[in-house]
Image (cartoon, rainbow, N blue to C red):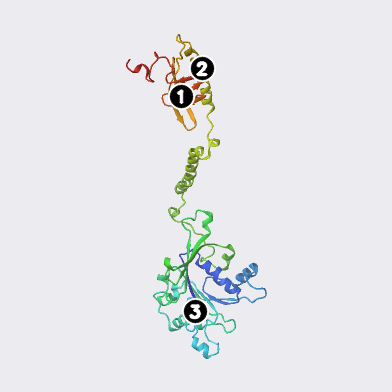
Amino acid sequence: MAMYVYCGLQGSGKSFEAVKSVIVPAIAQGRRVLTNIRNIRQDKIHALIERKALAKPEAPLGEIVPLTPEIILAPNFFFDPELLLATNGEVDSFVRPGDLVVIDEAWETHGPDRKLSEEHKKFFRMHRHYAHPVTGVTCDLVFLCQDIDTSLNRFVKATIQQTFHMKKHTALAAIPYWKNRYVITIYEGHKMRIKDVISQYQAKYDKDYFGLYDSHVGGVGKEVKVDGRATLFTKKNALVFSCALLAPAAGLYGLYSVFAPYLLGDSHKPAAPQTKQTADASSSGLLEEKLSVGKSSSSGKSRVALVGYLSTGDNIRVLVRTPEGIQTVTPTRFVPDGFATSAEVDGQAVSFSSGSAKSDASLLGEALPK
């Protein structure tokens, strides 16, 4: 026999999980199930098993035997394995060999303030002797409670093989996906410590199992939140989470926009605005006119001189001085060579020494002393 505990707060899914994962499979295997779960319905369980084909065709299904706290605490509820051997498998007790016993609200019958009878203690300690004479299946016992430490006697806790803890997604209830889901954590023994965790997974409520038992007194219950502040996804938090989700995407797009031209080559460089191209064309035309004026010198020497240049990657811009002032243009040819640097602008060669000696010698013009 194995002894298990299904625990969790109200509405966490422990009764649902006990019915779905314990009682229904046992009925499908033809076992006898004793339980005090409220208004559990054998006919609906049989119909569900047939509809979902959970049992072998023509195989006999098990039965449900209702329990009450008074029946559980009455004498001869459990049987003595020594008497079982003496009577060749015939025992005069409520529980029979091979039965599955599921006790809901275990604090009522096996709480820490309850003094266990010798009959119950002997049953818990000598459970391996309780096998069905035909099938060989031993008895199994499942306790349902909200908290192990405050709901079970320490003698019972010492015999627990595994603990199943159910937790509802209360803080995420505003999201439809999480509303019908809960977490199941399985522990070895009765101490719910991290080192004792066997597994943990998400489970989903199946509406086909809701009508098999009553989880509320007085019909179908409807739960409402008294204080909505306990919900994680309020309107304010939803806005914060939305911004937090969009921020990384916006940051990645910004980084891509900045570094893509350098990482992917010239083909991914952003095209220059049309207005700038027009401005460059008009500037080049104006400079051509000024260069032609600069050529008409009595000495025959050009009055246009190179005063500097700016290099950004593959782009070169030069500064030239004309009689009308300083201009910035794109050269058709450029040869960097220190003071001998030269460029060709609109078919005319310019350098640092190509200008007239009488022209200003600096970009500051008349601001410098003569």
Sequence-wise first label, 1 or 3: 3
Q: Secondary structure at mark 2?
A: helix
Q: Which numbered marker is on residue 89?
A: none
Relative to residue 183, is residue 158 depicted above or below? Answer: below
Residue at the spot 49% in from the left edge and 16% down from the top edge: 291
Badge 3, how many Cα within 10 Å: few under 14, some, many 20+? some
- Residue at the outermost left position: 369
Disc number at residue 288? 2
SS label for mark 1: strand
| Towards the viewer: 11 or 243 | 243
Eye-nearest disc, 3 or 2: 2
Note whether 254 is above or below 76 in the view shown.
above
Q: Position of residue 79 (x, y in %)?
A: 50, 84
Q: Is residue 296 above or below residue 317?
A: above
Query: Which of the two labelled residues, at mark 3 and mark 2, occupies the earlier sequence position?
Result: 3
Around disc 1, counting alpha carbons within 10 Å, would you say few (fewer than 14), some (14 to 19), or many (20 or more)?
A: many
Residue at image x 62%, y 68%? 48
Q: Amino acid at mark 3?
A: Ile
Amino acid under label 2? Glu
- The image position of residue 138, as x and y in percent, is 54, 80
Foreground pick, 360 / 5: 360
Residue labelled with disc 3: 71
Crowding around mark 2 (Cα neighbors within 10 Å: few <14, some 14 to 19, many 20+) is: some
Q: CA distance from mark 1 to mark 3?
A: 103 Å
The one of 10 and 26 positioned closer to us in this rendering: 26
Type of the residue with mark 1? Val
Q: Judge depth for marks 1 and 3 and give the one in front.
A: 1
The residue located at (49%, 59%) in the rendering is 223
Mark carried by residue 318: 1
Residue 213: percent from the left, percent from the top?
A: 55, 68
Q: How far is disc 1 from disc 2 in space, using C-alphas? A: 15 Å
Q: Mark 1 vs mark 2: which is more N-terminal? A: 2
